[in-house]
Amino acid sequence: MTDSDASDPRPRDKAANSGPAIEVEGLKVHFRTSAGLVRAVDGVDLAVQNGAFHGIVGESGCGKTTLARAIVGLQSATAGHVRILGRDRADWQRANRKGFARSVQFIFQDPLGSMSRRQSVLQTLEEPLRIHGIGNAAARRRKVGELLDLVSLPASVLDRLPRSLSGGQRQRVSIARALALDPRVLLCDEPLSALDVSVRAQIVNLFARLQDQLGLTIVIVAHDLAIVREVCSAVTVMYLGRVAEEGAARPFFADPTHPYSQALLSAVPSPDPRVEATRVPVLLEGDPPSPLNPPAGCRFSTRCPVVIEACRVTEPQLRAVQHGGRSACHLADTSGHPIL
Amino acid sequence: MRFARLPWLVLTPALIFVFVGVFAPLLMTHDPAVQDYTAILQGPSTAHWLGTDYLGRDLWSRIVGGARTSLVAMAFVLVAALVIGVVIGSVAGYVGGLVETVLISLIDIALALPSLVIALALMGVFSGENFDWLSDYWKMVLALTLAWWANYARMSRAVVVAELQQPYIEAARVMGASHLWIFTRHILPHVLGLVVVYASADAGALVLAIATLSFLGLGVAPPTPEWGQMLVDGMSYIEEYPNLVIIPGLALTAVVVSFNLLGEAFALQKVPRALRGRLLGRKRAERKAEDQARVSVEGQA
């Protein structure tokens, strides 16, 4: 596979552009199951700046996928509001589903499953255009050609079925399909986890290039911090349905303040041998507690190495910390924070 | 689609049946309803290839005409049952909730009773005065349709529910597709793919049901040629002129067996191939080896 996006993948810092593209306020998504109420997302506030490349990270089961799905309305929220591009998402979708789809698109974790197994790549890429009645056959064909160029796929894939493509090609097709309607906001639910490690870098670079080229706002859900560090301009760390820490990428990665963020980061190998030599992985004990029954006080208190008495009693709220972002830790504020 | 282990030969009767049914007017040498009292109960001859029955009607023409009667009735019933089944099953599967519960109960009730029993009961209902405007033939088609749709509804619902769980449906929603778009472009093709295949295999049972109803005097009224009726007519003469029973009986048997084998072939397609041949053989060999081992152990003890 050829790749023209070998240039510096780090996007320009566009985070300051004209207000937030996505605002999430007190979002809760609870699932009623036979075992009880699962609080997958339990009161999340989030702001994604226009033109940002925003990473949402956390362990499996921390609610990051549910959050992304709830933002685009694939999952109905129990409480809270989502505003996208300044409009209430629920109202917008109710009033004009197609208009919403033209502005906000979603990329699924499993590219193969997200495409009909009986449709060729051409049909898959044409479908959004047909749904929206955009262009005649020739115009659609032209648009499909442009999309292929955008994601660096050869025209020879057009007649093939999704299952006969490689993993990287599949994800490129699903990205191309999401871009067919020229959206302004793109949410990606773990778009890399179904891919080989060797292909991930290519897709990451593709995302970065697309963001640069098209001025998209991209939200990427990932559990791979290395990738988020590579490309994102802003980061939100989630733990057990809540935001643990958030901030601009560079300062956050330089000096994370939440013990959970620090533990997560310490698990990521660094490409810099000097840094790598001093890296001490912090091992968290046990699994995250069940979202069926979150612990009282700070949700991280059951595994936190620097836990104090207050942590088990009161739940810390997000507050400003040294790196300019916010952290939900009793021990972290603008004057200092724990260091593991 | 490939038919492993199914000799194409067994499909010949079904194919001949369809061919004869379609081209019946061209193949009949006589009017199958015309009685000729100068030629009663004759054996095969150049004038009457298969002989004549007790009213002097040409047996060949009646067999051919009977094929057409069955084929047309079968086609009506299959198409109608399929449409009703697909609509009910799809609505149940797509809408869900209370609608689904109600429709599933309906389907289950319909499936709990043998189709032929339902058809017979409905024929009884239709014999009332309120249904005089309906000819016996259409009463039969209607009764069989109402007895036959449930299987298609059950299958359609299963396919709809399974497809709806596929992530690509969600992807289509995200792209702004309407429910109608998703149903017609993505789900219906899957439903029809399965149901049409099943219907072609179900044809045998339907041919037999039509013949059965006519045999009982409930279906096609004379003088329309029909195999089940020919069997009844021929029964009185079975000792002297057995071909009056044997010929329509053979025709019916061959067609039904042929369609049933087709159905079996479709059913086998669903089984992973390895399980059919080699794996079964290996399982059998393993069991044999175990048995032998046990025997030898017991022998030592």
Image (tube, coloured by chain):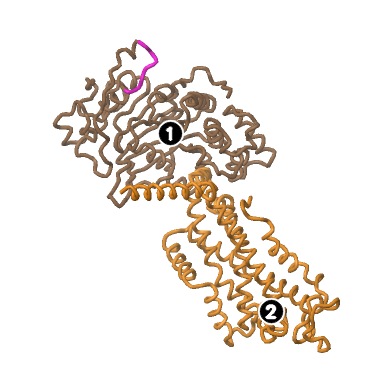
Chain colours: A brown, B orange
Q: Is residue A129 left or right of residue B97?
A: right
Q: Is residue A97 visible?
A: no
Q: Quadrant of residue A85?
A: top left
Q: Is residue A111 left or right of residue B199?
A: left
Going 45% across and 31% down the picture, which residue do you hit? A192
Q: Amino acid at mark 1?
A: Glu
Mark 2 Cα shell of 10 Å, populated few (<14), some (14-19), many (≥20): many
Q: Which mark is residue B245?
A: 2
Q: Is residue A110 visible?
A: yes
| Element at label 1 | loop
| In-front residue for pair B210/A277 | B210
x, y (%) of residue A288? Answer: 27, 35
Going 51% across and 61% down the picture, which residue do you hit? B89
Residue marked by disc 1: A190
Dot 1: chain letter: A
x, y (%) of residue A287? Answer: 27, 35
Q: Are marks 2 and 1 on the same chain?
A: no
Q: Is B233 part of what is drawn in magenta?
A: no
Going 47% across and 46% down the picture, which residue do you hit? A93
Answer above or below: position of B296 versus A178. below
The magenta segment is: A267-273
Answer above or below: position of A57 versus B203. above
Answer above or below: position of A120 versus A15. below
